[in-house]
Amino acid sequence: MLSERLCDFLDDWCGLDGEAAETAQMLCGPGGAYYLEWLPTELDQAIREHAITPEFMSTRLGMHFEDQATLDRWLRQRWELWFARPGQD
């Protein structure tokens, strides 16, 4: 089950109008500290558990994905853009 704060983040930063680079900038700014406390872990767990489904994305965000694997790749790309740091494995 997804936490309400993760759902709110997805609503605010991952919808049709959400730009991954803009989200990355926000996370590096003063407002990002709140999200960095919990978001990397919660989003990673949701991706690994396939808790964010294509149906969720379609219903909640109006975004359509062919299948779970396509959505998982899309989410993982964003996770890496937002949280992966050079030199981390």
Image: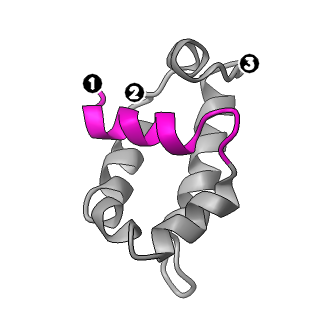
Residue 9 in the image: state x and y as whole percent.
42, 43
User: Which of the pair 79/31 is nearer the observer?
Assistant: 31
User: Which of the pair 10/30 is nearer the observer?
Assistant: 30
Residue furthest bottom in the image: 87
> In this image, 27 relative to 18: left or right?
left
Residue 35 in the image: state x and y as whole percent.
34, 59
> In this image, 51 relative to 78: left or right?
left
Mark seen at residue 1: 1
Residue at 58 percent of width and 65 percent of height: 24
Q: Are marks 1 and 2 in contact (CB under 8 Å)?
A: yes
**Mark 2 residue element:** loop
Residue at 69 percent of width and 31 percent of height: 70
Q: Quadrant of the N terminus?
A: top left
Residue 51 visible from this viewpoint: yes
For the record, the magenta segment spans 1-18
Say what amino acid the circle numbered 3 marks: Glu
Say what amino acid the circle numbered 2 marks: Ala
Q: Residues within 10 Å of mark 1 (few under 14, many from 20)?
A: few
Mark 2 = which residue? 51
Q: Residues within 10 Å of mark 2 (few under 14, many from 20)?
A: some
Mark 3 = which residue? 66
Q: Is residue 81 magenta?
A: no
